[in-house]
Image: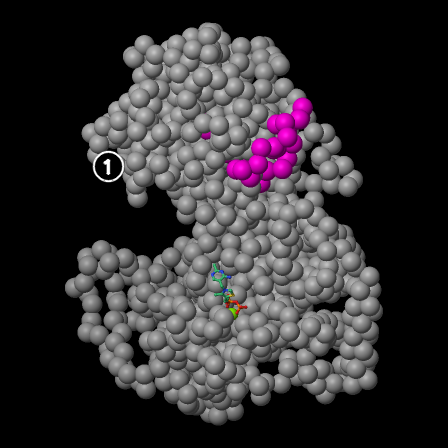
Amino acid sequence: MHRLRTCAARLRPLTASQAAQTVGQQQRPITVTSTGGVRTFQPIRCYTAPVASEPFLNGTSSNYVEEMYYAWLENPKSVHKSWDVFFRNANAGAPPGAAYQSPLGLTAASSLAAPQLSSLVGAQPNVEKLVEDHLAVQSLIRAYQVMGHHNAQLDPLGISCVNFDDAPVNTGFQDVGFYGLDESDLDKVFRLPTTTFIGGSESALPLKEIIRRLEMSYCQHIGVEFMFINDLEQCQWIRQKFETPGVMQFTLEEKRTLLARMVRSTRFEEFLQKKWSAEKRFGLEGCESLIPALKTIIDKSSENGVENVIMGMPHRGRLNVLANVIRKELEQIFCQFDSKLEAADEGSGDVKYHLGMYHRRINRVTDRNITLSLMANPSHLEAVDPVVQGKTKAEQFYCGDNDGNRVMSILLHGDAAFAGQGIVYETFHLSDLPSYTTHGTVHVVVNNQIGFTTDPRVARSSPYPTDVARVVNAPIFHVNADDPEAVIYVCKVAAEWRATFHKDVVVDLVSYRRMGHNEMDEPMFTQPLMYKQIKKQKPVLQKYAEKLIAEGAVTRQEYEEEIAKYDKICEEAHARSKDEKILHIKHWLDSPWPGFFTLDGQPKSMSCPSTGLTEENLNHIGQVASSVPVEDFTIHGGLSRILKGRAEMIRNRTVDWALGEYMAFGSLLKEGTHIRLSGQDVERGTFSHRHHVLHDQNVDKRICIPMNHLAPDQAPYTVCNSSLSEYGVLGFELGFAMASPNALILWEAQFGDFHNTAQCIIDQFICPGQAKWVRQNGIVLLLPHGMEGMGPEHSSARPERFLQMCNDDPDVMPAITEDFAVHQLYDCNWIVVNCSSPGNYFHVLRRQILLPFRKPLIIFTPKSLLRHPEARSSFDEMLPGTHFQRLIPEAGVAAERPEEVKRLIFCTGKVYYELTKERKNRGMEGSVAIARIEQLSPFPFDQVKSESERFCNADLVWCQEEHKNQGYYDYVKPRIRTTIQRAKPVWYAGREPAAAPATGNKNTHLMELRRFLDNAFGLDAFKDQQ
Ligand SMILES: Cc1ncc(C[n+]2csc(CCOP(=O)(O)OP(=O)(O)O)c2C)c(N)n1
Ligand SMILES: [Mg+2]
């Protein structure tokens, strides 16, 4: 082995510097004219090792020679005789230029008898020409591998507008001149490089055959895009899959299964069209091979050990996928077309082509159990992508599937959406991150070459709709969807790729859309020529059936029977569907939580136990929070001080914000609840207060997460800095939270205002998710918020937006029952809180898990309060028996003689501290009471009522630091008014309405603060408004 390397190394050209030293030895370049133009070769006589000083060796050719050399070492007969002689001489130490000898016995006479061999030696020992031609062939092979897909016949309509601009593809017989070859070379035999598999068991082929085989591999109905992948093993793997002669052979059984699947796919759409021709269904016509494609990916993956497949897809073909891939009962699908169907579940429900589904069944091909789920999704194209990934990650995490061998995701896309939606890119960028990878997703694009009414020519700037996948080096298999066997083949390869490399892969089904965007649309308005062609297009099922009948794989009768069989299944299901009178959305759940609810889907109780902890427990968690639980670990000096500070607080039985969070997380972990905190820079915390991951100052990548050193039987704590994405990462965490109710999943925005780049996840999933899809979710959003003079950015987490989307009625006073607080939570669509103390933050986090149901929780979190000396809580507020306080009533001087209080100020969050300071400065502790509404929604009607009744002679003020058209005012005012039966006005003290969330000028900020504090404490301030 060593000898081989040394000898091969001696054959390498010099480096540039070495060449410079020996430049004097160089000879004049040789110029060769060929059909491809003029080529110049430098006869580099500058090798230090005399044996390698051959005129034909330059940088590129030496690679070729090296390859020959290895082949020769393995078997001297595998190379041409001339090489054999050359290597023998070189090995024997022949002087420069002398290693080559014209091989004896290969004369012009023998060349007549063996035309192929003669071509190598040719008219004589023109070794340069020999190497040149071999290199040319190598380049030609490479050209096919790189660009063969440009010439593949991918478009069933033959009108593809994929534009490769200035990238001409020089392949085929007619273009050999480009490589310096000519027609007379077509019959010459060339040795194949190791970077191709077209030879099968042959190591050399005539040029003509090389081209034919390359055309077969790269320019038929499959276009393989992979040469951008910078991993040799992966490239070789793909080459082997597509180049090996005869790889695309199908057994008779496989062909018949494929035909049966095509029958189901096609006849399902036809059945729906026949029965409900005026209903939208976003049919699959024109891309019917999607169904066998997905089934193949699933079969293959099941064969490779996958037990759970989580899928996300848009509207196109969704009903077909539900029926024929997930195997939802047909009557359940058909009954949804009945407009008289009554909804059995509370909530809005959703249209049929958005609902999700979960099904466990036996895979008929592998005879193994497989769970298939299709995630419910909104109309917003591609929004479900990160959600699917998060759910997949969670399923992998909870079953200990560290490499994604048992759980996988499949994502379907439309061509326009895949290219146009940025979330696709964000999702791809999660695919290889340690805390976010799902170990490879198979992406399938239904590329019908149109998006609604828009041509790809104006819908994207890249040649293919799939180019976005190149950023993660995912191979892309384009395939003509009118060739079902080619489709099945690429799907097999895609599934194998995922199982082998655990990386993403894309299948691009190049197809067409037979109808309009939906079945009522007229496509000829906008795509007249395309649709003229489509009208002429023979349906793929018909084409494939005719092919198989012609081959004798099936008889016409068998084919017709298959159709009749499926039509009968549909008819019978349709008859049964008429008995369905009620639509249960819960039958369309994509993520059931068995065991968490009662059998009929209700919470097991309607109460929430105390969220407090024992003193011992608080002390224990506090100690972990203020220490480094591993040996020989050097932390930063600044961090040592922080930990000392924590220890001091624990000794004093108090917590600040970071410790409050620690207590909540630590205790839940000890109780067996998994916690995952994700977002940008969450490990340390944007404001450097959290420090959940410690870094050894001396050892690279050595980290310690103390929260994972709490107890041997604790649940794991995952804290992970995310990519710089909100839409993708929030979607991911939402998906993660779907998998299990026994986990606290939190996403933290760097600053609260950044949540708006994830607005789609908030608006379409988090806010209405349960109403649309009867699916609960306990995700927590931590949104730093506060007007601290930092300018219009970074100040507001836009509480007004969250509050505007709460489903409680501002004008109806609810009946106050004993378990009102929990009932209210059960009925709401999400919980919105703004805690003013670390103790209350601690409680609300724990309550999130101790509640018998799950609701999204939005927490506006503080910035300056993280270090505010007054924003601390005593252990006393966190002991057993204590709870989250929805409203923190006035407990100071004003509470002693409430009837003498002139003003009751309601507020929330940080402004409380500004108000108490101002009240103290003004000496108004006895005349002004301040109550904090900690849980904004659902609104604590009961507690606001008792607080306002307690201070019965006080006027009422809502005070906020946000601008009037922002913040909480519009939400709280009508609710306070409803509570007090509109007996009094609710005055406003806060900033004036404004377009921006905050001023960029510090002085203006302070002036505004002064002004609204004056209003809040000026007992005559609202006289004029009365
Ligand atoms: C984010 C988003 N923007 C716009 C739309 C409206 N819309 C619905 S389908 C569609 C065209 C989708 O084209 P493509 O992705 O190619 O899927 P196809 O319908 O062709 O299968 C558009 C623009 C949407 N649903 N989501
Ligand atoms: Mg499309």
Q: Is residue 597 visible?
A: yes
- The residue closer to the viewer here, 749 or 553, is 749
Residue at 51% x, 16% y is: 950
Q: Label 1 crowding class (10 Å Cα cut-off): few <14, some 14-19, many 20+?
A: some
Instruction: Specify the segment rendered in magenta.
Output: 809-836
- Residue 241 % position (x, y): 58, 67
Residue 844 visible (yes or no): no
Tell me the residue at 41%/59% (across/down).
8
Specify whether residue 817 is painted magenta.
yes
712 or 560: which is nearer to us?
Answer: 560
Give the residue drawn at x 24%, y 58%: 16
Could you tell me residue 194's position as x and y percent? 49, 67
Local secondary structure at mark 1: loop
**Residue 956: x percent and y percent?**
42, 24
Q: Residue at x 41, y 45 (%)?
A: 756
Q: Is residue 167 above or below residue 976?
A: below
| Numbered label tally | 1
Q: Is residue 686 above or below residue 29?
A: above
Whether 433 is drawn above or below 231: the answer is above
Viewer-nearest residue: 574 or 807: 807
* Amino acid marked by disc 1: Gly
Left or right side of 471 for 38 = left
Residue placed most toward the observer, 978 or 462: 978
Residue 790 rendering spot, x and y as whole percentages = 28, 33
Q: Which residue is mark 1?
A: 1000
Is 222 magenta? The answer is: no
Main SS of the magenta segment?
A: loop
